[in-house]
Image (cartoon, helix red, strand yellow):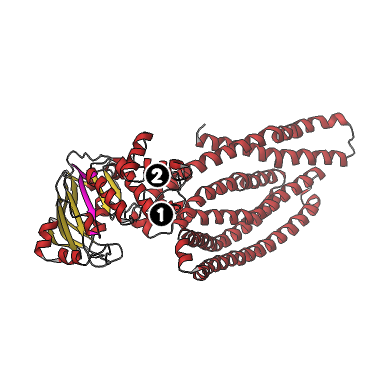
Amino acid sequence: MQYKLRCFCFLFLSAIYVFVMYILLPRGTSNIIGMLSDGDFEIANYIPVLLWALVPTVFNNLFIIRILDWLDWSLDAKCGEYLSKLAFDAVINQSMTFHSNHFSGSLTSAANKLPNAFINFKSNFGWNVFPLILKLVYALVATLLVCPPFAGILLVFVIIYTIIAVLIYFKTGHYEKEMADAENGQTGQLADAVTNVMSVKSYARESHEKARFAKATAKTKKATFGVAKASMIRNFSLNVTGTITFVVVLVLIIMSHNLFGLTIANMIFLYSLSDTVLSNIWELNHILRAVNRSFGDANEMVKILDMPYIVDDKTDKPIIVEKGEIVFDHISFTHNGKRDELFQDFCLTVPAGKSIGLVGISGSGKSTLTKLLLRFADVDRGAITIDGQDIRDVMQKSLREKIAYVPQESSLFHRSIYENIAYGRPNATRAEVEKAAELAHADEFIKNLPDGYDTLVGERGVKLSGGQRQRIAIARAILKNAPILVLDEATSSLDSESEALIQKALTNLMDNRTAIVVAHRLSTIAGLDRIVVLKDGVIVEEGTHKELLNKGGEYAKLWSRQSGGILLDM
């Protein structure tokens, strides 16, 4: 059964349920009391009333309410699943620039709140708003049939009450949004501190983080008091209006026999209808509060859903890599938030099957080139092509499938070591995963762990050392076996012995593959086909290791600074 059909069935059955419980049953009850007040005690005369009033009520309570429950729960499950996937897709498909500018904790909080906000709104609408509308419509129509003047007076009060409630609703909505934003920020601060707990403890900055978190909680408290203040003003205004309405209606009912010639049964029926209207219109106060909260909770994620992707696919065309030639063709690029271009009319060609090293001081653009190649960001002008195909004209997924990337800071999932390595090629066999670990010289330390390849590594791989995490990341890249290899300081976290062993494995891996290697430790790139020296986004030198040393330029200076395995910050 599709969503629309389930919703229609819910609304249709709800309309029946409300009519039976709030019109049919009160009408039958008032008729019985009217008959009793007239002195009619003949039981046979009550049977028709019992049949058309009580039988539907029993059916309502035994069957219709249960069906409504099932429809509501099924819609919760299906909508929750759909919106959770929608939120996950929206966050995971955003660019690295987007993620760099957002707290992961805030994004997690916003993504979790979206399905809950919708479910709360749907339940509130299905069980409160829609029945309230039905009750008001049914009651006003029934009142109109019994006593038109009374219906007109009741309608005026309903309109006044609704206007007051809606006007205050818009004011409180602002505070509800503020509170939801503050809660997301608080969650983000908490996640940021917990994720970096090693830095917090090693620098003895617990007090600093407590102070930062206290500011976030104070903001949440302030927003909560704002909601409370607005709610109290709203409750008082609506209480006054509701009390006045109740008194006027009660007086009119008492006088209705003299004014309108109503019978006892109709007077009781009018009282029942008025009570339905007044008690439910008061619920409008709580209903609007719940609606406000749902909108506030969903606000941040809805903005993200509406946000265009900074890096988006123009087509569903996959990239075809036969040779692997990479060309940075007169590209220009400016980092987000910076004024000056890092690259301006930059050109670089990496021939198919060749390996180049990128070196230079920090901020020269080495890692940025690799990120542009992976389309973590797009160039402002020019183009990056692989085998003549502009990478902006192919799917990002297919592009990244052709590139094995090992970043400087490898991040592992809180899953088993086996799953983390197999992430490079999920359909790989167990033997292939273990072979990749052997080539990355990770097999030895993995087998010494209590659960071997099934050992959970902790969040971001916290249970492993930096060198162990890096070897897992290298094993993942080896297993991927892609035609293009990008290494961004891939061996920076390794000891000299492990680096020497892995360097041989990486050299074999780079054979007949196009490779770009970013390195501070120049010994790791000395054997590459070509070395490119960058400075402020410009190529200042290029050539082989030997040629660059003979030039005595920037590369030679960098080389001369490294001795005894110590590398100055570059």
How much space separates mark 2 and mark 1, taking CA atoms? 15 Å
Which amino acid is tagged 1?
Answer: Ser
Which amino acid is tagged 2?
Answer: Asn
Marks 2, 1: nearer the viewer: 1
Q: Residue at x 25, y 62 (%)?
A: 334
Residue 487 lies left or right of residue 154; in this view the side is left
Q: Is residue 336 visible?
A: yes
Q: Is residue 491 visible?
A: no
Q: Which residues are magenta?
A: 509-521
Residue 247 or residue 425, whichever sits in front: 425
Q: How many labels were placed on the picture?
A: 2
Q: Is residue 363 above or below residue 104?
A: below
Q: Position of residue 43 (x, y in %)?
A: 87, 31
In the picture of the structure, the residue carrying the numbered disc 2 is 420
In the picture of the structure, the residue carrying the numbered disc 1 is 465
Q: Are marks 2 and 1 in contact (CB under 8 Å)?
A: no
Q: Is residue 385 above or below residue 563?
A: above
Residue 17 or residue 65, whichever sits in front: 65
Q: Residue at x 42, y 42 (%)?
A: 447
Give the crowd class for mark 2: few <14, some 14-19, many >=20 residues within 10 Å. many
Q: Position of residue 144 (x, y in %)?
A: 68, 46
Q: Position of residue 569 (x, y in %)?
A: 28, 66
- Mark 2 or mark 1: whose residue is earlier in sequence: 2
Residue 555 or residue 93, whichever sits in front: 555
